[in-house]
Amino acid sequence: MKRIIALLLVASFSTMTITACNTMAGVGKDVSAVGNKVSDKAQDCKDAKC
């Protein structure tokens, strides 16, 4: 019985870890895209186009 509980805990932890990694990767891509937009706009304003 203890072995089954231990296996369930390991499986649950593994699933949460994988899900968290995928979520953080998506957030990283979103933040990067926003950073690129801000950088592009700053460059336009520097060139007096804003």
Image: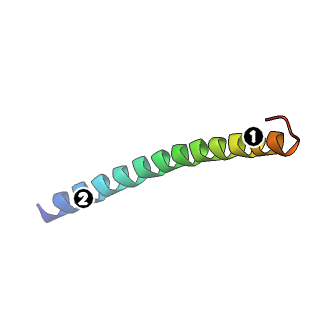
Question: How far across and down, in percent of the image, does residue 27 sit?
Answer: 52, 46
Residue holding disc 1: 41
Give the mark nearest the N terminus, 2 or 1: 2
Q: Amino acid at mark 1?
A: Lys
Spot the residue most to the top.
49
Q: Residues within 10 Å of mark 1 (few under 14, many from 20)?
A: some
Q: Residue sitting at 22 percent across and 62 percent down?
A: 6
Residue holding disc 2: 9
Disc 2 + disc 1, Cβ < 8 Å: no
Q: Nearer the viewer, residue 32 or 48?
A: 48
Callout 2 secondary element: helix
Q: Quadrant of residue 43?
A: top right
Question: How far across and down, in percent of the image, does residue 45 sit?
Answer: 80, 42
Q: Nearer the viewer, residue 44 or 23?
A: 44
Left or right: residue 14 versus residue 2 is right
Q: Is the residue 40 above or below the residue 8 in the image?
A: above
Q: Nearer the viewer, residue 39 or 21?
A: 39
Q: Nearer the viewer, residue 35 or 18?
A: 35
Q: Residue sitting at 74 percent across and 46 percent down?
A: 39
Question: How far across and down, in percent of the image, does residue 17 sit?
Answer: 40, 55
Q: Amino acid at mark 2?
A: Leu
Q: Residue sitting at 49 percent across and 50 percent down?
A: 24
Q: Nearer the viewer, mark 2 or mark 1?
A: 1
Left or right: residue 40 versus residue 29 is right
Question: How far across and down, in percent of the image, does residue 2 sit?
Answer: 14, 64
Q: Is the residue 3 above or below the residue 23 in the image?
A: below
Q: Residue sitting at 58 percent across and 42 percent down?
A: 30
Quadrant location, the N terminus: bottom left
Left or right: residue 18 versus residue 28 is left
As measured in the structure, the alpha-carbon distance from the residue carrying label 2 to the one carrying label 1 is: 48 Å
